[in-house]
């Protein structure tokens, strides 16, 4: 299966330009770490992006939690993304009718499409949400934009299970030019029938933490090793890294754990 193939091989045969770039970046930096940079000031966000940037492949933002969002935030992020060679993933979790989502993606104060390589959405509204995001990307004519489907959630009592999760996979298969993969606790391709030969959706796993099992608000963690054993490709970690007493040491620890597990898997 694709999980046993090296990222370099997957980069070579993949048709989605942004997935190609992601796999190549991972090989180059020897990292499959996505930093969930849930900081609330521009200064902190840019500081962490600068210090940890060399060790990560993607920086994930929640841009609407910043107290002082401005054009400087975006200019800083974009500059650091080029300097340290990481992609930017705005964890927007779009969930609305296509017409509204297009406005949220392109416009408003945040203009997410302008600067975020990756965004995610739920399929709660049905496939129209993906169609809307795809239309925006295609009419902009850019090659370095992509979407992840939120196929599962890590929080206790999550309702993103069963037929919702299965529909996520089926909808992903309808939009291979736009959908890069999904956010999930494990590999899910086997859940929905008619897996296409050579299909290669990327699995981003969040809720990854080396030293904690969860938080007081229902978050549930697994380790980098268990995530990779379950078929994950990229590990999203937030507090495990940025809230550590030494975040640089922590990001290196996650980088090594993720990369060792990846190497063990591909042999
Ligand atoms: O490592 P943490 O717990 O500090 O942060 C986890 C990050 C947060 C969540 O908003 C996000 O991952 N997340 C997501 C994503 C990425 O879509 C889905 C989910 O089910 N659980 C989850 O924690 O920024």
Image (cartoon, grey):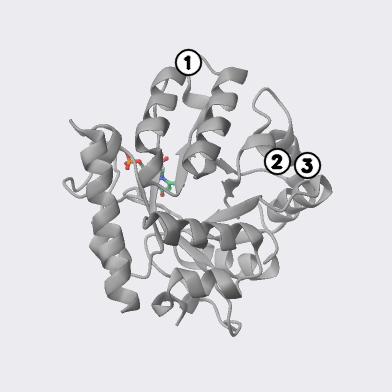
**Label 3: few (<14), some (14–19) or many (≥20) C-alpha neighbours in 10 Å:** few
Residue 31 against residue 43 in the figure, above or below: below
Q: Tell whether 140 sits left or right of 213.
A: right
**Label 2: few (<14), some (14–19) or many (≥20) C-alpha neighbours in 10 Å:** many
Residue 183 against residue 104 in the figure, above or below: below
Q: CA distance from mark 2 to mark 1?
A: 23 Å
**Label 1: few (<14), some (14–19) or many (≥20) C-alpha neighbours in 10 Å:** few
At mark 3, the secondary structure is helix
Q: Which mark is residue 101?
A: 2
Q: Residue at x 74, y 46 (%)?
A: 98
Residue holding disc 1: 67
Residue holding disc 3: 99
Q: Which mark is residue 251?
A: none
Q: Residue at x 75, y 49 (%)?
A: 142
Front residue of 79 and 159: 79
User: Is disc 1 in contact with disc 3, using a CB cutoff of under 8 Å?
Assistant: no
Q: Position of residue 248 (x, y in %)?
A: 26, 37
In the rendered image, the quadrant that contains the N terminus is bottom left
Q: Residue at x 48, y 56 (%)?
A: 25
């Amino acid at each position: 299966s694709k999980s046993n193939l090296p990222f370099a091989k997957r980069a070579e045969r993949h048709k989605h330009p942004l997935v190609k770039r992601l796999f190549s970046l991972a090989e180059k930096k020897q990292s499959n770490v996505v930093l969930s940079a849930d900081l609330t000031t521009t200064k902190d966000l840019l500081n962490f992006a600068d210090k940890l940037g060399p060790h990560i492949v993607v920086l994930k933002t929640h841009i609407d939690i910043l107290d002082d969002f401005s054009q400087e935030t975006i200019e800083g992020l974009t500059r650091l993304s080029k300097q340290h060679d990481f992609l930017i993933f705005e964890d927007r979790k779009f969930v609305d009718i296509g017409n509204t989502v297009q406005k949220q993606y392109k416009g408003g104060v945040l203009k997410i499409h302008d600067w975020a390589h990756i965004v995610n959405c739920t399929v709660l509204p049905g496939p129209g949400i993906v169609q809307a995001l795809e239309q925006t990307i295609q009419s902009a004519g850019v090659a370095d934009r992509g979407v992840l489907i939120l196929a599962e959630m890590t929080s206790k009592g999550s309702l993103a299970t069963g037929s919702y999760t299965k529909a996520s996979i089926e909808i992903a298969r309808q939009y291979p030019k736009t959908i890069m993969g999904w956010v999930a606790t494990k590999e899910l391709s086997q859940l929905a029938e008619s897996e296409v030969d050579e299909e290669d959706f990327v699995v981003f796993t969040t809720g990854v933490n080396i030293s904690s099992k969860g938080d007081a608000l229902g978050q549930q963690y697994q380790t980098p090793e268990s995530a990779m054993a379950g078929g994950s490709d990229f590990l999203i970690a937030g507090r495990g890294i940025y809230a550590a007493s030494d975040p640089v040491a922590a990001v290196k620890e996650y980088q090594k754990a993720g990369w060792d597990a990846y190497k063990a898997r591909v042999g």
